[in-house]
Image: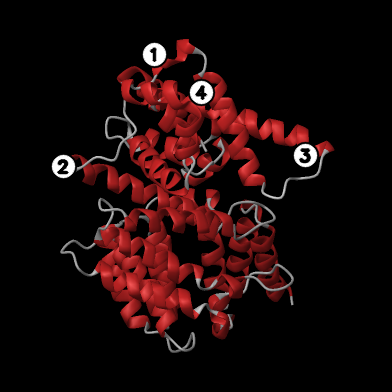
Amino acid sequence: MIAVLTRIFGMHNLSLAEDVVQEAFLKAVQTWTFNQVPDNPSAWLMTVARNKALDIIRRQQHFQHLSGELAYHLQHAAEDTVRQLFLDTEITDSQLRMIFACCHPSLKEEDQIALTLKTVSGFGAAEIARALLTNEAVIQKRLYRARQFIKEEGIQLEIPLGPQLPPRLETVYTVLYLLFNEGYNSLKADELIREDLCMEAMRLCLLLSEHQVGKQPATFALLSLMCFQTSRFDSRIDENNSIVLLQNQDRSTWNKELIDMGYHYLRLSSAGERLTVYHVESAIAAEHCLAATFEETNWQRMRQLYDLLLEQKPMPVVLLNRAIVQAQLGKKATAIQEILAIPDIEKLLSSHYIYSAVLGDLYLQCGEPLLAQKHLTQACGLTTSQAERKLIQEKLGLINN
């Protein structure tokens, strides 16, 4: 809705479009509380937003803020024009335009990501802060700074071509990747997997892959990764909302159609000459899908892929995952040493539960209960997820027994 309305009003009136959409949802809350929810809530909201847009458009002073050609059409056939703008094809195009506009290279990269997650994906400041490992106050400043820059510089709602495209595409990929990750391993206390966010990320990535500017190997690789990861949703959580670890998952429940789609897009991604992190991460996910059982996983191949990923993405989380692969190869003591050698590991252990959780589990496997208890207890206090806390407490129970 915001994308379509911004198409009408212009990118510099982004805040105005957001206000109109907010009013539509506010009216829904007020109306649906006392009346029956309409058969098609989405259409109801779209209609209310359209009418509010028309009210503003009919106020002649607003025409000066619109592009000349669009203002002319709206002035002479406002009802028909706005109705056309709410067709599925226009919504799709508007969303893509919005993504690329928010990822304008003149904006600072952190502002691009925050603005896109807020505008295109509907993230709140708290969710963006979690995704970017910062706080809400910082995100609010970034959003304000980005909106002001767009307004002052007159940035257009457009999909660039030629040399302007690659810099924006990289940020678009980052946004879609972060959106999917937040859904795949949500930080919400009572919801480990947010399928709505994952589906939105996949939808936008598919949208990008079908557009002439987005038919790139990296796009296909990212979409492939999403397909592989999504295929395991039904096996990751049991009926008691407990986490099922990869080695215990029922692979017969993995979605074969999504896995086949993952292979399809992975093949398409091989057409280019440039290897991206999405190619490597998709290949890692594919290895899990290729193995009939957890024990049959080609861990030697996995270590090679993580070595390759480290070259592309030298980050602590990659080092952590590579250490986990080392443990699967029977090198648990080596894995522990590799984790302890991660730069700023003490800070990571005290701020991100996953590092303490993995380290504690490895100490448990190595028969060192005191160190295992220390790190698992620390991890339990750091996570906000009920499912993750339950899993850690189960491991702590093994020590006490």
The residue positioned 46% from the left and 36% from the top of the image is 4
Vertical placement of 226 versus 262: above or below?
above
| Label 3 sits on residue | 32
What separation in Å lies between label 3 and label 2 (alpha carbons)? 49 Å
Looking at numbered disc 2 in the image, what kind of residue is underneath it? Answer: Pro
Q: Is mark 4 on a helix, strand or loop?
A: helix
Tag in front: 4 or 3 = 3
Q: Distance between the residues labelled 3 and 1?
A: 36 Å
Residue depicted at 49% across the width and 46% down the height? 131
Q: Quadrant of residue 109?
A: top left
Check if mark 4's residue and mark 2's residue have beta carbons within 8 Å: no
**Amino acid on which the number 1 mark rests in the picture:** Gln
Front label number (4 vs 2): 4
Which amino acid type is shown beneath numbered disc 3? Answer: Trp
* Furthest-right residue in this view: 34
Residue 274 lies, in percent from the top left, at 18, 61
Q: Mark 4 points at which residue?
A: 16
Residue placed most toward the observer, 230 or 343: 230
Mark 3 or 2: in front is: 3
Q: How far apart in space, not on screen, are marks 4 and 2 (Cα)?
A: 31 Å
Mark nearer the N terminus (4 vs 2):
4
Which comes before the other along the chain, label 3 or label 2? 3
Residue sitting at x 43%, y 80%: 289
- Residue 377 visible within the image: yes
Q: Residue under circle 1?
A: 64
Give yes or no for contact between labels 3 and 2 (Cβ–Cβ under 8 Å). Answer: no
Q: Which of marks 4 and 1 is in front?
A: 1
Q: Is mark 3 on a helix, strand or loop?
A: helix
Relative side of 277 to 187, left or right: left
Question: Distance of mark 1 from mark 2, alpha carbons?
Answer: 32 Å
